[in-house]
Image (tube, helix red, strand yellow):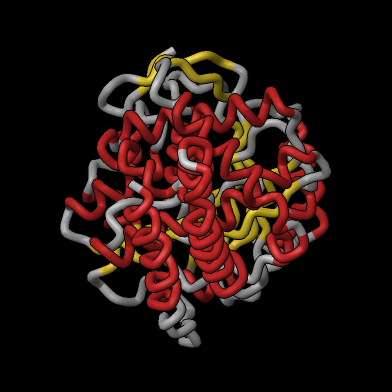
Amino acid sequence: MLSGSVVYCILIMVAARNYLKIPPQRVLITEPVSILKPLFGADEDLEQNLRSFFMQDYAAFELLLAVNHEGEQGAIVARKLMEEFPHVPARLVVTGDSPRPNGKVFSLQQMVRHARYDILVMADSDIRVTSDMARVLASELLDPTIGLVTCPYRAIPGASFWSHLEAIGMNTEFLGGVLVARFLSGMDFALGCTLAVRRTALEGIGGLEALENYLAEDFMLGRLVTQSGKRVILSSYVIEHRIGSQNFAANLRHRLRWARSTRRSRPWGYVGEVFTNPLPLALLMLMVAPKSWPFVVLMIAFRAGSAFAVASCVLGDPLTRREFYLVPLQDVFSFATWIAGFFGNTIEWRGRRHVVLPNGMFQS
């Protein structure tokens, strides 16, 4: 098992190097883009996150923002920015309460109906981008064989200790798994924080209606687009995922939701995640066989190498460089959450409790 973890760390470093060979897109493109932003609640720094989308340096784009109800904080912030940027074609879509378990998909459905263009960029409310985001994603969709572009992300924590721990995990562990999957078998899934899809590719899978009962709708979207004959690629553009501050209880609920949804979406892949935990496995071995400490030192070196390859080389993440001493604690916490993810099928999402079904769908 530990040998498998060594191989996995090596694969991360190789996969990161392979990803970095992607040439950044510098094509001058003017095909119009519709940017869709589902808003829910009041994220930390919501105004600054949304402002980065209003400030796109792109010839033709529109911005659609969806809220459940008119008086929500998201609606107030959206209207303020629409007044601040009157030259940006922007619309607020009030959807009402979702009749489906996945409220995000419902909001996206309403915005797609109002969107005018073929290229649809879907981005969560806790995402911050630079002014060239729309240009890069539109350029990467120029290839007619590509139906969907999904963005890697650099997690930016809030003030809480637990958000720092989670951000380090995202920047050193989660994306490493994505890069390995891309290197070994290509992209047949998507990351939901920010992605770009052609309307024709979306229609080819039956529209967003095909996703409305799935918890991991991003994963399923990538899978269905791939099954329809179009390619999914990992973008050269790295977004910022502003994860905000959470206390321990909220952070644990979030991690368990992620673990249980992953187990239901790809059960064998979830079992295989045992190899993605080199440090906890090495510590367990040290407890059983104290004389194995040289191997533990070796595992620390491989884990450090894989973390550096992803966090520093791919993401340019300053957080992991500053707080590298938190990596072992994050790994142990992640390992404990992974074990807990094997038990239970209930999750809490957007203030409601749901049951995750064996096929990855969920119900209230």
104 left or right, relative to 40: left
Q: Quadrant of the C terminus?
A: top left
Q: Position of residue 228 (x, y in %)?
A: 17, 53
Image quarter of residue 102: top left
- Of residue 42 and residue 290, the one placed in the foreground of this image is 290
Instruction: Name the residue at 31% across, 36% down.
Output: 271
| 127 horizontally vs 347: left or right | right
Image position, residue 296 (x, y; %): 52, 54
Q: Is residue 253 in view? A: yes
Is residue 358 placed above or below 290 in the rendered structure?
A: above
**Residue 295 in picture, x, y percent from top left:** 47, 57
Task: Please report the residue visible at 26 percent of the width from the left and 64 percent of the height from the top.
Answer: 184
Looking at the image, which is closer to me, 177 or 5?
5
Residue ID at (40%, 36%): 216
Q: Residue furthest front?
A: 291
Residue 79 in which image quadrant: top right
**Residue 90 at least partly seen:** no
Residue 270 locus on image (x, y percent): 34, 38
For residue 274, side relative to residue 351 (left or right): left
Position above or below: 6 against 19 = above
Q: Is residue 225 above or below residue 20?
A: above
Q: Nearer the viewer, residue 171 or 354?
A: 171
At 49% from the left and 82% from the top, the residue drawn is 24
Total number of numbered discs in the rendering: 0
| 292 relative to 357 in the view: left or right | right
